[in-house]
Image: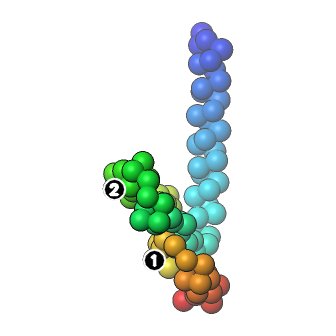
Amino acid sequence: MPSPSGRVNEALDRAEVRFTMKALAVYNSFFLAAFDTRISTADVNSAVLGFFVKTFGYAAKPIADRLQKKGGRLSLTPEGFFELLRAAAWAEQLVKGQ
């Protein structure tokens, strides 16, 4: 008989599978977009931020990859934004379906 924590983990695993299956149905019904907001490492002058950006990069591409892996269809190329005007223009393209 599994321990109480084992039963909780099993229940969480089942819930995750159900959630994932429902999410896949949604992913296949809509076009998706992936983006991130960025901070310039030069503006912040932080060794820690610089290390993380050099090591891991930014989030837009990995987000897009995960969405596509789960069956999503991307409307636009994943983007990262430092400035609000460019983000607004990208969002406008998204709304127009281009």
Give the side of residue 77 with respect to residue 15, left or right: left
Q: Residue at x 62, y 18 (%)?
A: 5
Q: Is residue 57 above or below residue 78?
A: above
- Compared across the picture, whether 12 is left or right of 82 comes to right
Q: In this rendering, does residue 37 appear at all?
A: yes
- Badge 2: few (under 14), some or many (20 or more) residues near its Cα, within 10 Å? few
User: Residue flagged by tag 2: what amino acid is it?
Assistant: Lys
Q: Are marks 2 and 1 in contact (CB under 8 Å)?
A: no
Which one is in front, 45 or 83? 45
Q: Which mark is residue 29?
A: none
Mark nearest the camera among 2 and 1 is 2
Nearest to the observer: residue 3 or residue 42 = 42
**Sequence-wise first label, 2 or 1:** 2
- Residue type at numbered disc 1: Thr
Q: Which residue is mark 1?
A: 77
Residue at x 48%, y 60% (from the top left corner): 44
Q: Is residue 27 above or below residue 92?
A: above
Judging by the rendered image, the residue that carries numbered circle 2 is 54
